[in-house]
Amino acid sequence: MGDDGALRAEVRDFLRTCRDDGVFEPVCDSWLRGHSPRFSRMLGERGWLGMTWPKEYGGHERTAAERFVVIEELLAAGAPVAAHWIADRQTGPLLLRFGTEEQRRTVLPGIARGEVFAAIGMSEPDSGSDLASIRTRAERDGAGWRVTGRKIWTSHAHRSHYAVTLVRTAPRSEDRHAGLSQFLIDLSSPGIEIRPIKILTGEEHFTEVVLDGVYVPDERVVGTVGGGWAQVMAELAYERSGPERFLSTYPLVAAHADAAATLPDAARADLGDLVARLWALRTMSVGVTGMLQRGESPNTRAALIKDMGTALERESIETVRRAWTHPGAPAVPAELGGLLAEAQLAAPAFTLRGGTNEILRGVVARSLGVR
Amino acid sequence: MSDLLSETVNDLLAGSPGVDTGWDPGLWARLADLGLTGIGVPEERGGAGGTLADAAVVARACGYHAAPVPYADHAFVAVRALTAAGIPLPDGPLTAAFAPPGWTVAADGTASGVLRGVPWGRHAAGVAVIAAEEDAGAIRVALLDPALVRVSAGVNTGGEPRDDLAVEGAPVAEAVRGVAVRGVAVRDMRARAALARAVAITGAARRVLDLTVRYAGEREQFGRPIGRFQAVQQELAELAGAVEQAEAMADLAVALADESADAAWAAAAAAKVGAGRAAGIAVATGHQVHGAIGFTQEHALHTFTRRLLAWRDEYGAEGVWSAELGDLVAAGGSEGLWRLLTSGGVHA
């Protein structure tokens, strides 16, 4: 049944060689914590970025299923994919769907080579779950716009080239979703100040981006002026639907599985329960990949999977922790202990980023017809 | 194909009255007329051909409508065991039983032992008795005629027939001696039976979700439908997620049922764990949102929740399958685990 064998084997060989050569050590949450431009370029050379995009934009015209194989192998191995992750996952697809020909030709080939990185400009200091309340505004200035405001929790903006930024291009009206637009902002533009923010682990992957009258030419508007809300919802489907929403802690689960033979029966049963849920979520995630491939917008299913997947990621840490802190449990193997410690500090973000689980369940409830 | 089948079966079942009578021979006859009871039986042997996926569509619909027929036991377990053994299938509903400890078949072909809790035992045209062979990779399948044994009628929590069949060395049909089937282990058949329940659970749990969403939209308190309250919405969303998760895993297990024995077994185990979990959430949330009316037999909810409570325990509760799956994962380590998780491939 697995017709993906050859590609999967190729990726696994590559990852094994990288580990043997010391290119990376597996970490949990590597799609945000493992920032390595060098590794991203290595993937680009192998044709594993922009995999599904047309060749004329530097893509490789592979199927969504083939891309799924590559990214799930990378995530399971805890490989450092953070540098290109957002550009490959959502910025590229967004530009393919809504961008201009010039934008695609300018940006996509670099992303596919693993040389151009992008950040997400959605949240603001006063706008988290209530995204439509953003205050960053753009005003007309000749053949372009002047953008003023603040974006925050922007992962890796200080290491990225672009940020697709949601801005208000018309004053708020009764339709609070109207008057929003997406700009592809060059982060080296004058008037931009980026302040890194330390997260729980002490790493600096969050940033605050202050925009002070930043000039954005008309050709950097993505899609239609005023059509930003619908576009950002489409972008969120890419953001929410992938296997990183249940595989962030997989390196920990894998290390746990390797050591589980020494554990008491109850701990192995907990592992069995965890595996059953992980397997079901992967199956659902594969299904959503099919929907994206067919051009459908699986917003509700993506919300559902992200809600359950991120909750499972959090619980998986507790499952592993319980197994090794039980009276009579053997000593925790060193590598496993390290993964467990870092996973606990990464965990609070799982159920917040990309839409809190409370918001996601609201999306699901709306699809059920009760909202 | 499966959409059309699903529509046909759901139309038939929705139009069938009397959902809580335990056994509806008329409904069985209508399913047989449509060829649905012959799914999984090779066409050259008078069956309808078809795949386990087709049978799963029917079994899920039976769960959704609480159909009082042993469809899942018949199609997933009995037909599979008897067909593999080359034993001709009697007309009518078939059921299955796993030989208990102490089950013996004497040289003259008579059997002794008590088969406990056989689904629809008293109504079945035949019971496929599945016993372990000395060779662990094989089973011995016997066909028992329940008319020739002593039946103690019983029911499960859902009110479905679960009968004890006492076989006391009585002279019984020749076929009871059994036929050995190589390449199928008792564990494979146990997993197949668990999958039958998992699929049925996904149908009934989906029905509880539908009933609960409808009720939350109709029932008003504080001047608005209770579904307008976020606290209720969050519960409904969690239930919807659990149901979808259970459906996805059951579908994968059905698709893998004819693949390598290990993958098929593990997927069925995972499906039963997921379905059992969804059943628990469906019962708790369904009743919580329905309030007092749902706690009565005046409302249809109990038809489904009581079955869910029974089915999640039959052929192994979540704890049983989690433990076995956990042992498999611990033995195979991370390499084996990843092979398992990706064994469905990526068919997008």
Image (cartoon, coloured by chain):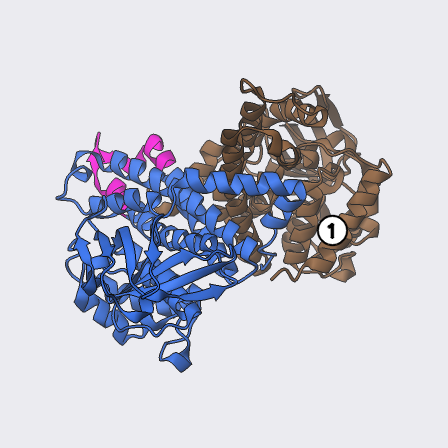
Chain colours: A brown, B blue
Q: Quadrant of the N terminus of chain B?
A: bottom left
Left or right of B271 in this view: B74: left
Left or right of B263 in this view: A82: right
Crowding around mark 1 (Cα neighbors within 10 Å: few <14, some 14 to 19, many 20+) is some
Number of residue marks: 1
Range drawn in magenta: B211-235
Give the main secondary structure, helix, strand or loop, of the magenta stretch.
helix
Residue plotted at (79% across, 54% down) = A47
In the depicted structure, whether residue A270 falls above or below residue A327: below
The location of residue B339, given as percent across then percent down, is 63, 49
Left or right of A263 in this view: B14: left
B70 or A301: nearer the eye?
B70
The location of residue A43, given as percent across then percent down, is 80, 47
The location of residue A278, given as percent across then percent down, is 54, 42
Chain letter of the residue carrying label 1: A
> What kind of residue is marked 1?
Gln
Residue A280 magenta-highlighted = no
In the depicted structure, whether residue A77 falls above or below residue B271: above
Q: Which residue is mark 1?
A: A103
Q: Quadrant of the C terminus of chain B?
A: bottom right
Secondary structure type for disc 1? helix
Left or right of B339 in this view: B40: left
- Residue with the most extreme bottom position: B44
- Residue with the most extreme left position: B298
Residue B314 visible, this angle: yes
- Residue with the most extreme front position: B107
The location of residue B98, given as percent across then percent down, is 36, 54
Quadrant of the rendered structure where residue A275 is? top right
B211 or B176: nearer the eye?
B176
- Residue with the most extreme right position: A21
Quadrant of the rendered structure where residue A179 is? top right
